[in-house]
Image (cartoon, rainbow, N blue to C red):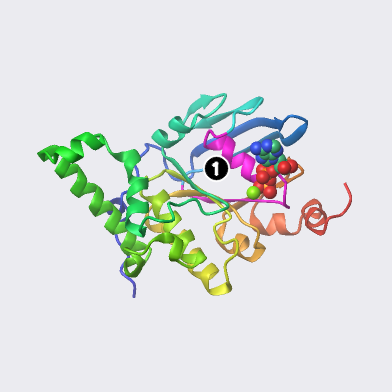
Amino acid sequence: MNVRPDPAQLGAPDDGIAKGDLLLDVKNVSLSFGGVKAITDISFDVRKGEIRAIIGPNGAGKTSMLNVINGFYTPQRGSIVFRGEERRAMKPHHAVRQGIARTFQNVALFKGMSTLDNIMAGRSVKMKRGLGWQMLWHGPALAEEIEHREKVEEIIDFLEIQHIRKTPVGKLPYGLQKRVELGRALAMEPSLLLLDEPMAGMNLEEKEDMSRFIIDVNQQRGTTIALIEHDMGVVMDLSDRVVVLDYGKKIADGAPDAVKTNQQVIDAYLGVAH
Ligand SMILES: Nc1ncnc2c1ncn2[C@@H]1O[C@H](COP(=O)(O)OP(=O)(O)O)[C@@H](O)[C@H]1O
Ligand SMILES: [Mg+2]
């Protein structure tokens, strides 16, 4: 039998919110680019401890929604409540400081840098002392450096990527790059992890591995996850609740089984005329 480590030891942040309580509340958000309405009046929430899937056909507004949540885009209307604090818009620095980390639809890593250094880069948001301090190699900076290294090593073990720790990520197969990117996001010890198509372009085995890591992150580290995914099988297996977008609007929201049999959702996926 597997011995599961105590989540508290794996650095799950204590954000004072109980499991099942509201962590993120997206309220009536609308976002347009010039004449293009990417998101129209969308509301949904994410509860602490859950895996929340965001699905919908291409161009539905899923990535735009993640970009609003982590402050890349400022919506024209609506607001975001994260950990009880309401904002018209999240700014990237708010998002990071408050514990929102993400991965991207197209892997965004430093390709020439090693796995270890990429994950360490994710850790930099946690570093109190600037580079100058670290170069001086004084006591406090050294202690902090050691602590960061330990956290990064723990993530490398957790994701089973010891064998590629020194490899430049540009040389890695795509599936492993995605895993390293997950590692970089985990290095921020987020309370909310946003994953934009973490399994896109993967073969079946890679998908199964990534699914397992997502479940382990959620269960062992206690991290709340919102993920965009196209593979319906994966979505049904992984998620507690699903929100469905189509042409920038929310068309369904609920348990995977209910969403799967919803006629509007079926029509959207079959491309029935609107
Ligand atoms: N930066 C942008 N500038 C202009 N249009 C954009 C931008 N980002 C997204 N869009 C448009 O918004 C709509 C939703 O896109 P997106 O959020 O990427 O959808 P999804 O991730 O569901 O495929 C699309 O019509 C897309 O072309
Ligand atoms: Mg997208």
Q: Is residue 79 left or right of residue 250?
A: left
Q: Is residue 74 left or right of residue 225?
A: right
Given the current orientation, which residue lies at the most extreme right position? 273
Q: Nearer the viewer, residue 116 or 242?
A: 116
Rendered location of residue 154, percent (x, y):
29, 58
Task: Please check the rendered image and state whether residue 53 is part of the magenta-colored stretch, yes or no.
Answer: yes
Whether residue 218 is visible here, answered yes or no, is no
What kind of residue is marked 1?
Val
Q: Nearer the viewer, residue 63 or 190?
A: 63
Rendered location of residue 68, percent (x, y):
58, 35
Quarter, ligand 1: top right
Residue at numbered disc 1: 46
**Residue at 62% from the left image edge and 31% from the top image edge:** 27
Rendered location of residue 83, percent (x, y):
46, 33
**Residue at 38% from the left image edge and 63% from the top image edge:** 159
Q: Is residue 169 left or right of residue 200?
A: left
Quarter of the image where the N terminus is located? bottom left
Give the magenta range.
49-72
**Residue at 87% from the left image edge and 54% from the top image edge:** 272
Numbered disc total: 1
Is residue 270 placed above or below 79 in the rendered structure? below
Dot 1: within a 10 Å radius of its alpha carbon, few (fewer than 14), some, or many (20 or more) residues? many
Rendered location of residue 195, percent (x, y):
53, 51
Q: Nearer the viewer, residue 34 or 112?
A: 112
Q: Quadrant of residue 162?
A: bottom left
Is residue 232 placed above or below 85 in the rendered structure? below
Given the current orientation, which residue lies at the most extreme front position? 112
**Residue at 44% from the left image edge and 56% from the top image edge:** 111
Task: Please check the rendered image and state whether residue 232 is part of the magenta-colored stretch, yes or no.
Answer: no
